[in-house]
Amino acid sequence: MGGFPLYLKAGDNELLRQVYEDILYRDIAQRYSINNMRQFRELALFIMSNTGVPLSFNKLKTYYQFGSVNTVSKFIGYMEDAYLCHTVSIFAASLKKQAVNPKKCYATDIGLMHAVALSESDNKGRALETLVFLRLKQQYHQVYYYRTHNNYEVDFLVREKQGSPLLIQVDNSLKEPHARDRELRSLWAAME
């Protein structure tokens, strides 16, 4: 349900939508003098509706017709500064690989995500993955996702100061053999 006290008390999604609008307009648009609010709003809505999905900033630039990838990066940075979302990079030994690979963005609040996201499909899985991310973010300084050489994805990789990295796969049900095999296949490939 998220962590906004007034929403938890009243249960009214309209309160969360108003908080979202206030963040977009007062905390971001006014502060950074954003001129094209339509593009910015569409990008913000896309991020909130696609939490936990790897996103190519270059594809977002093209789709939303921004002038450059820097604009997309800057706008997402503004959203991070306003605590609307967090970005997660791919784990790679090279900073260049981290910079050029797609990033995952996670909503900072589950209630806010549910109140404004366009799609209800797969919301349980994305909500669970977002909750796991938020908990990992509290515990670990750096949280990544991982992609194996054969393109299998592990949801999270965290590193403690000493020791091996921890690989974490999130799924709301492993009852179906296909889902279980897919999740375990990714973990085994990453461990290799």
Image: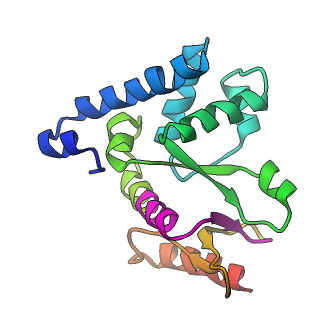
Quarter of the image with the C terminus is bottom right
Q: Position of residue 5 (x, y in %)?
A: 22, 45
**Magenta-colored span:** 129-149
Left or right: 90 as drawn, with respect to 175 = right
| 117 is within the stretch colored magenta | no
Q: Nearer the viewer, residue 22 or 133?
A: 22
Q: How is the image coloured?
A: rainbow
Q: Give the vertical position of 35 relative to 169 (above or below).
A: above
- Residue 52 located left or right of residue 55: left
User: Where on the picture, by quarter, is residue 114?
Assistant: top left
Residue 82 image point, x, y percent: 50, 36
Q: Position of residue 6 (x, y in %)?
A: 19, 39
Rendered view: 139 above or below 123: below
Residue 157 relative to residue 65: left or right: left
Q: Residue at x 57, y 81 (%)?
A: 184
How many marks can you see?
0
Res 111 → quadrant: top left
Q: Position of residue 46 (x, y in %)?
A: 53, 34
